[in-house]
Image: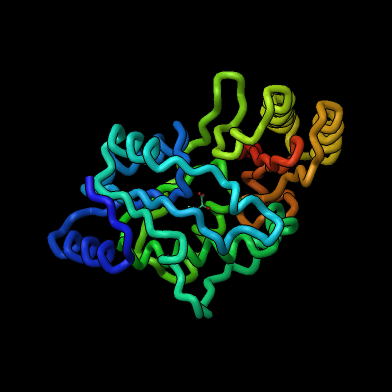
Amino acid sequence: MEIFKTAAELQKFALDAKRSGKIIGLVPTMGYLHAGHASLIDIARKKADIVIVSIFVNPTQFGPTEDLDKYPRDFEHDLELCTQHGADVIYAPAPDAMYEADASTWVEEVKLSKVLCGVSRPIHFRGVTTVVAKLFNLTLPDIAVFGEKDAQQLLVIKRMVRDLNFPVEIIAAPLVRQNDGLALSSRNRYLSETEKSNALVLSQSLYAARGAIESHGLEGVDLIIEAMKEKITAAGGRVDYVEALDTANLEPPTAETKEVLLALAVFFGTTRLIDNQIIQVK
Ligand code: PAF
């Protein structure tokens, strides 16, 4: 496995691979890899000749009061996981190597990124789309794999790819959970044991809501959401949002809606967790 630290080395590698007809798969990450990331690498491994995993804690997607400095990092562990799952290349640029000091260009999606997480994290998705666009230019991927855990991110990236004609297929990988239901996240390591067990209310209430929507449709969805909020608050969570939106446009569902994203963001202590269900509507 090769490890590149600079954009120039990586882009040269990708150009050479492309010219020799190789299919390139990209798995963008912020490191501190877990089984969820491993599943993304496994998907890329099946579909691509060359699998590139980027590991970069992207400063432009963190707000001024967010956890950029304390975001967990463990490069040795990441290296081991990437090796075990057959990645060919790790791109791990130094913190200040990804952006020029006077960088003044952004890639911004301005509709889907403005709801859900975009309300409390107003600059987040602009940072994500900008860094992902840069990674696409550096790695020239045929496919790129993103997790459904970050369902809104996935929709925003798909929209960016469509709108800017990036020649890359975006592959959605199913969310991976612990046996007890907690969605895997690098941020779970911030949780105390009590917070971890309280946070199980998230997946439990999402599954209950999913069952209700699958059986009865979207008629009573507002009541379902209110009940979820009450349950989560009773378990010690501080709700940022719980919402059900049409996956086609991230607007409130209508009679035409075929699929909803039931998504939530909740604080346990100072840790903000997200989770979701994507539900087909009959
Ligand atoms: O999902 C993530 O880990 C990040 O948002 C991403 C896509 C790697 C961009 O920094």
Q: Is residue 234 left or right of residue 114?
A: right
For image coordinates 55% across by 19% down, the residue present is: 179
| 144 relative to 200 in the view: left or right | left
Coloring applied to the structure = rainbow
Looking at the picture, how far across and down is residue 142, in whole percent?
A: 30, 57
| Image x and y of residue 122, in percent | 69, 63
95 over 78 or under it: above or below = below
Residue 281 shows in the view: yes
Q: Who's the residue at 47% across and 40% down the image?
A: 32
Left/right of residue 121 with respect to residue 153 in the rendered view: right
Q: Residue at x 42, y 53 (%)?
A: 170
From the viewer's perspective, tell me whether residue 160 is left or right of residue 25: right
Judge whether 96 appears above or below 204 on screen.
Answer: below
Which percent across, then down, holds residue 245? 70, 49
Residue at the extreme top: 179
Q: Quadrant of the C terminus?
A: top right
In the image, 116 versus 259, the foreground residue is 116
Answer yes or no: is residue 220 visible.
no
Picture quarter containing residue 16?
Answer: bottom left
Q: Quadrant of the N terminus?
A: top left
Numbered-mark total: 0
> Which of the 4 image quarters holds residue 12?
bottom left
Question: Hey, which quadrant is residue 208 in on the image?
Answer: top right
Q: Toward the viewer: 229 or 35?
A: 35
